[in-house]
Image (cartoon, rainbow, N blue to C red):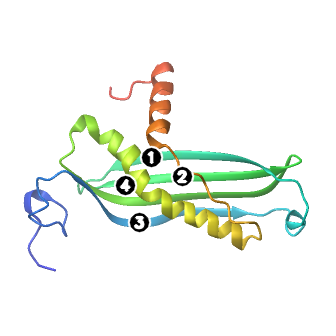
Amino acid sequence: MTDTSAPNGAPEGTSEDAAGQTGVRILAQFVRDFSFENPLAPDSLRAGAAQPAIDMGVEMNARGRPDGLFEVDLKLSARALRDEQAVFHVEVVYGGLFHIAGVSEEDLEPVLLIECPRFLFPYARRLISDVTAEGGFPPFLIDPIDFAGVYAARKAQAEAGGVVGNA
């Protein structure tokens, strides 16, 4: 580690070779919020019970920071219901701190809301799998998510609703 600052206002820890190149770097990953509820335990764990219906939710949020970096949050939630009763509910907001270089302004939003969540997803998925297993259930493995499809659907929904992305 050196005492000199990074070139061209790039965040500390970037090299001169990386300056001016297109790329996405994860500088940190973290759990921002995490919740698991198993309200009917131990009755919810009985053998032979019917498979619960699972309701999944996915949200992505991104924001710029004054230091030129970006925080991206991936929120995954899953609620299992059996006979109208909650079997379990898990929610994780998994975040990352990203340095993004060489990306045009028009391409920045898709990078933040598609590519960055792709980096975060495996770690958030593992947390959900681990906590459901620790809760007494089989590990709940979320299928891979098409973040480009989610982004396109949300963008189309916002445009149809009269919401303008860039005012």
Instruction: Tell me the amino acid under the disc marked 4.
Output: Glu
- Lower sequence index among marks 2 and 3: 3
Q: Quadrant of residue 18?
A: bottom left
* Residue highlighted by disc 3: 29
Q: Residues within 10 Å of mark 3 (few under 14, many from 20)?
A: some
* Residue highlighted by disc 2: 75
Instruction: Tell me the amino acid under the disc marked 1.
Output: Asn
Q: Quadrant of residue 151?
A: top left
Q: Residue at x 11, y 66 (%)?
A: 6
Q: Residue at x 49, y 43 (%)?
A: 146
Instruction: Tell me the amino acid under the disc marked 2.
Output: Lys
What kind of element bears circle 2?
A: strand
Quadrant location of the C terminus in the rendered image: top left
* Residue highlighted by disc 4: 71
Q: Residues within 10 Å of mark 2 (few under 14, many from 20)?
A: many
**Pointer 3 with pointer 4, Cβ within 8 A:** no
**Pointer 1 with pointer 2, Cβ within 8 A:** yes
The residues tagged by marks 3 and 1 sit, at their Cα atoms, a distance apart of 15 Å
**Outermost residue toward the bottom in this view:** 1
